[in-house]
Amino acid sequence: MKDSNVLLVTIDSLRYDKLINIDVPATPCINSLSTSGCEFTQAVSNGPNTTASFPAILTGTHSLSYGPYGVLDKDKSPFLARSLSRENYDTIGYHSNPFLGNEQNYHTGFEVFNDLVDGSDSVTTAKDRIERQLDPDSLFYHLLRRIWHLFSVTTDTKSYARGDSITGGAIDWMEARRSDDPFFMWLHYMDVHYPFDPPKWVFDELPFDRPSNRRIVTLNGMMQERPEELDEQDVRDLKRLYFAEARFVDRQIGRMIDAIADMGELEDTIIAVTADHGEAFGEHDRFGHHVYPYDELIRVPLVIGGGPIDSQTVDEQVQLLDLAPTLLDLVSIDVPKEMEGRSIAPLLRGEDSFELSHPAMFISESGKTFGVRTEQWKFIRRSTTNEKLLFDLESDPNEEVNVASANGDVIENLENIILEYEESVDAGVADIEWSDETKERLQNLGYLQE
């Protein structure tokens, strides 16, 4: 597979289960890739949110060293893009997540790095300026935000770039490219992230109708600000919006794969599709992506296909920490010693002797919450309260019964993994100064709430 192109697609907030069981699949294009390639049914993220999970995806390292906002070390972090660039790969990235920008050094190693922001017109700029002058606790402030949300749904103005913009920019780059070198392309789609507002045409393919604009605004507002008021029908409608967003992103991934095929590059392209984390819809009485690494947040899709990768399904647990080393190994590039994950490429090459199963560790809040997951056990430790949770995933896959008190030996073994890691890493907290534009983008996505 040496000199193969590499397409890495990440989808913000996409759960493994997609939430709704209907005859119409949420992700037919990803499903097709999984049929011809390798699907990992027990892939877990190394954090329950973007800043905790993405260091693992793009550097093969845990987030503990990078502070609460995931500011990577541009000199020391073993960036996947930089390793490929040093081997004469053309490197291109398209995303629209304010946590993954230049301020956090995610551009390192990319020759072309596009942080696309829709809604940067004069109307949005005026709204942002007015908001910064208002008391965030005032009635007028909340009224303005509600009016803005209704306007954005009605006019299709988003807090991030739509997936068709991401795919369109990537295809334009491919068509204008004159290089004979292989390429590494990273595409990150934000559409499945709150707020949920799928394009109208997606519902033509689904067995349920699109809610009214006012209903969409109300549902998103309640999920973010008053989740305790959501009733069963509200949650059902939110899940449908989420499902439709997944369907939309899947269409964009299909467009990208078709474009690569039209250019005659598909047989020479390795394609990996995954998500940084999932999303909660009332499980454990929580919505969104919070700090507790339950499976609705850390169990994610992972498919690797294209090129010469054979069709197979892997049911043993793998973790996203292993993804960057795997992609490098698949194209015969040495894995930097600083990467903490290990390559699972031998499995994709059919090496039966490869030992797969090993514990996955996840971190959030710069180490305030740790967890370890094996195929049977899930252990969660909150450092601030010394709370310890243990779930037997074989008998309790929904993680509802804490069996910590009856399994001290299991906790000791799993907690030792955390303690050994804490002792081995310099957990210095990097600071960051957000620009006003980034602060506004984060707020529109449900972060940095006053």
Image (cartoon, rainbow, N blue to C red):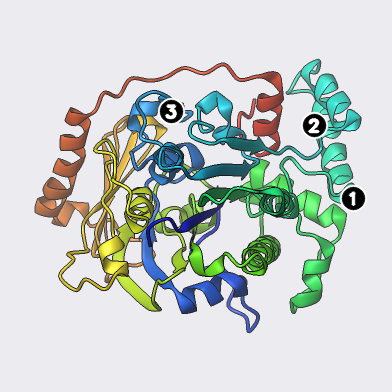
At label 1, the amino acid type is: Thr
Q: Which residue is mark 2?
A: 142
Label 1 neighbourhood size at 10 Å, few (<14), some (14-19), many (20+)? some
Task: Locate residue 72, reporting x and y percent.
Answer: 43, 28
Q: Residue at x 90, y 31 (%)?
A: 123
- CB-based contact (under 8 Å), mark 3 and mark 1: no
Q: Relative to residue 156, is residue 65 depicted above or below? A: above
Q: Could you give the CA–CA distance between mark 1 and mark 2, rounded to whole angstroms?
A: 18 Å
Q: Which residue is mark 1?
A: 154
* Quadrant in which the N terminus is drawn: bottom left
At label 2, the amino acid type is: His
Task: Locate residue 41, reporting x and y percent.
Answer: 39, 69
- CB-based contact (under 8 Å), mark 1 and mark 2: no
Q: In the displayed orientation, state which residue is furthest to the left.
A: 409
For residue 291, what is the image quadrant? top left
Q: Secondary structure at mark 3?
A: loop
Q: Residue at x 67, y 64 (%)?
A: 259
Q: Relative to residue 171, is residue 115 depicted above or below? A: above
Which of discs 3 and 2 lies nearer the camera? The answer is 3
Q: Which residue is mark 3?
A: 72
